Structure formats: C-alpha cells, structure tokens
Amino acid sequence: MERRLLINISALTLTMLLSALLMYNLLLGEAEVGGFGLLGVFLASLFSHLTVVARDLFVPVFLSLTGVYHPVALGFSAGVGGAVGETVTYYWGLNIRRAVWKEAADQPEDRVSRWVRRYGLLAAFLAAASPLPDTPIILLAGSAKLSFLRLLAVEVFGKTIWYSAGAFLGGAIFAQMAASLGTFVSSLLVFAASLTLCVAVYSRRVRSVVFSALQRAAKLLGFRSLPED
C-alpha cells in the first residue's frame, strides 16, 4: 500500500507540473506549444489516471488547448493517455485485488461486480465513455480473465469518445468563460470543477445513478446480459 501511495503522489505531482508547464507556454507565449502540446496532454492524462482518484486534474490545460488543436486530436491524445494509465493498474492492482477479494469474501457481491459479470467489455467501454471511475471495473475484468489487449482497445475507444466530446462542448464553454473572465481565472474554475468531479464520482449515490443510466442505455442498444458463471 505504501508503494501505491508513493505512485499516486508521484503521478499527481507530474500531472501538476506538466499542466503548469503547458499553461505557462500557452498563456505567456514564450514557447510554441507545437507537437509538445499533444504529447503533454497525453502524459498529463496518463499521470492523472495513474493516480486513480485525481484523473481529471489535467482538464484545465486540456480545455485551454481546444483553441489550438482539433477536438478529436485532443480527445485521442487524452484518450490514449487515460486508457494506458487506467490499464496499467490492471497489473499494479493484482496484489491489492487479492487482498480486496479476501476481505470481501464474506460480503455480498456489489453492483459494480454484477455489472462487469453481466456486460463484460461493454461495461468497460461504457465506463470509459462516462465520468465513472474505471479502476474497479478494470480490476474485476482482470479477475474475470478478459483479454488485456481487448480491454486496452475498448478503453482507448471509450475515452477518445469521452474526451473528444468534452473538447467539443467544454472547449466552447471554456472559450466563452475565457473571453469574459480571462484564461487564468477560467482555468482555476475548471480546476475546482474537475476536483469536485473527482470526489463526486466516488460517491456511492452518484455511482448508482450513473450505473443505472448506463445499464438502461445498454438495454436500449440491445445488449444482452452475459451468462452467469
């Protein structure tokens, strides 16, 4: 657990440093953002998702770059970074998962577990394309021996959709905010909103509401439940 805490702190620190560097270049114009901007978004997203609990802290710099790059390019960079960051926990969480399963052996199966067992990779995709935390689903997918490469592909696809949509919609909102409040103040407000979202998605009540909505969406799309073991 100490190793995991050290990784979280390191990833969070790297995310904040990368975001600050990109914002400095963008605001002061002393260096071209250039190709480093997309690479920076990829790395910031990667490190954010490695922290598990602070995965959206790179969003302010992500939105500030919507005026520089096409939303799909930003979405893909953030999506690949986020997917890699999340699926790395597939391996890091092996020992943690054993401890969790041992501790939870006498407890009823929770909703996330049932959801993954029923929908498999579809559950991973819907979580990747939503604000839901992916880590519990990825750990459960590993325990169910789902293909790692397929899981990674699903995560990339889902997160690219999520962040591309965020770049389209959030970029327009951020541009309006920046025009009236300035880029720096707008970035601080987005940072506060991102931090609030990071906390909110780990609320049992919020997760329950989002899971219910996604499950209804899965049924409307005609996906059947996977057979129980």
Image: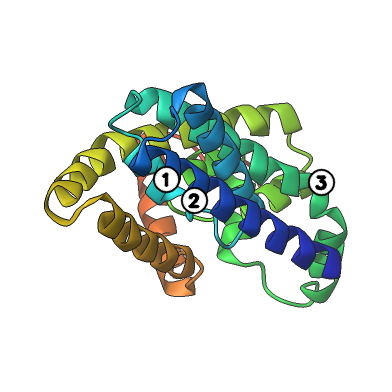
Give me the C-alpha separation between circle 2 and circle 1. 5 Å
User: On the image, numbered disc 2 is attached to which residue?
Assistant: 20
Who is closer to the viewer here, 19 or 113?
19
- Of the residues under marks 3 and 1, which one precedes in the sequence? 1
Please rate how many residues cluster around mark 2, counting C-alpha atoms within 10 Å: few if below 14, some from 14 to 19, many from 20. Answer: some
Residue 88 found in image quarter: top right
Asked if residue 24 lies left or right of residue 190, the reply is right
Residue at image point 79% right, 40% down: 145
Q: Name the amino acid type tagged 3.
A: Tyr
Who is closer to the viewer here, 58 or 201?
58
User: Could you tell me if the residues under marks 3 and 1 are in contact, i.e. CB atoms within 8 Å?
Assistant: no
Give me the C-alpha separation between circle 3 and circle 2. 29 Å
Q: Is residue 181 visible?
A: yes
Q: Report the mark closest to the observer, 3 or 1.
A: 1
> Which numbered tag is attached to residue 217?
none
User: On the image, numbered disc 3 is attached to which residue?
Assistant: 91
Asked if residue 101 lies left or right of residue 133, the reply is right
Please rate how many residues cluster around mark 3, counting C-alpha atoms within 10 Å: few if below 14, some from 14 to 19, many from 20. Answer: some
User: On the image, numbered disc 1 is attached to which residue?
Assistant: 23
Residue lying farthest to the front in this orientation: 30
What x and y, as percent, mark residue 160?
Answer: 46, 31
User: Could you tell me if the residues under marks 2 and 1 are in contact, i.e. CB atoms within 8 Å?
Assistant: yes
Reply above or below: 25 against 177: above
Give me the C-alpha separation between circle 3 and circle 1. 32 Å
Q: Name the amino acid type tagged 2.
A: Ala
Residue at image point 31% right, 33% down: 66
What x and y, as percent, mark residue 64?
Answer: 33, 42
